[in-house]
Image (spheres, grey):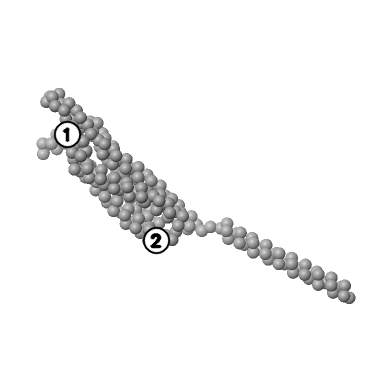
Amino acid sequence: MEEAKHNEAEEAQRIEAGEAKHIEAGETSRSSRKVITFEPKLVINKGISVLGFLLRLFAVFGTIGSALAMGTTHESVVSLSQLVLLKVKYSDLPTLMFFVVANAIAGGYLVLSLPVSIFLIFSTKPKTSRIILLVIDTVMLALVSSGASAATATVYLAHEGNTTANWPPICQQFDGFCERISGSLIGSFCAVILLMLIVINSAISLSRH
């Protein structure tokens, strides 16, 4: 009788140990499934942040490239009719100087905002940083847009002139100068489009946090 009772006790202990192992295995599998699963909203938010970083990176090239191209523009030609050396450079026109300053400021800001943009990819908490970026992005968009618009009027006059005001076009003589400032203008307007997309991206990212 005692041996039977002892065997029954050992069998009960084995059954309890098996159930405990089964419970632990179930808990382990559930915990592993929790680690594997991910939230679609979090993935979408990180994708939006990565897109914002790429837009800022491209906008850096647009603004700084336009400022450098315009700021190094100058040309000298010899007038055969008057036998004089004619010179022209961007600093002779205030609108082109404003164009260079506006793009340089925006480019500098975009470079400084890149580390912040990288930080926001891996962190979803700092809402204040996103608000500050959105506000400054909007200011930079207005600055670059105004600089590009002001330079557009000057470039148009350089190409076409104005017969009413008796302003002849200068691109007939300074063709290299006009090609350079026209290229800078195209790059700046591309930066304006990128800044618009950055503002939209920042607004969407802020609304999802």
Q: x, y percentage for residue 92?
A: 18, 38
User: Which structural element holds mark 2?
Assistant: helix
Q: x, y percentage for residue 148?
A: 25, 44
**Quadrant of the rendering where the N terminus is positioned:** bottom right
Looking at the image, residue 176 lies above or below residue 53: above
Looking at the image, residue 20 lies above or below residue 45: below
Q: Identify the residue position indicated by label 1 in the image.
A: 169
Where, by quadrant of the figure, is residue 2 drawn?
bottom right
Question: Camera-side residue: 146 or 63?
Answer: 63
Q: Identify the residue position indicated by label 2 in the image.
A: 127
Which amino acid, mark 2?
Answer: Lys
Task: In the rendered structure, find residue 90 and report the number of the disc placed on it.
Answer: none
Upstream in the sequence, badge 2 or badge 1?
A: 2
Considering every residue shown, the one lying at the far right of the view is 1
Considering every residue shown, the one lying at the far bottom of the view is 1
User: Which structural element holds mark 1?
Assistant: loop
Q: x, y percentage for residue 30?
A: 62, 62
Q: Is residue 182 left or right of residue 30?
A: left
How far is the residue under mark 2 from the one under mark 1? 52 Å
* Front position among marks 2 and 1: 2
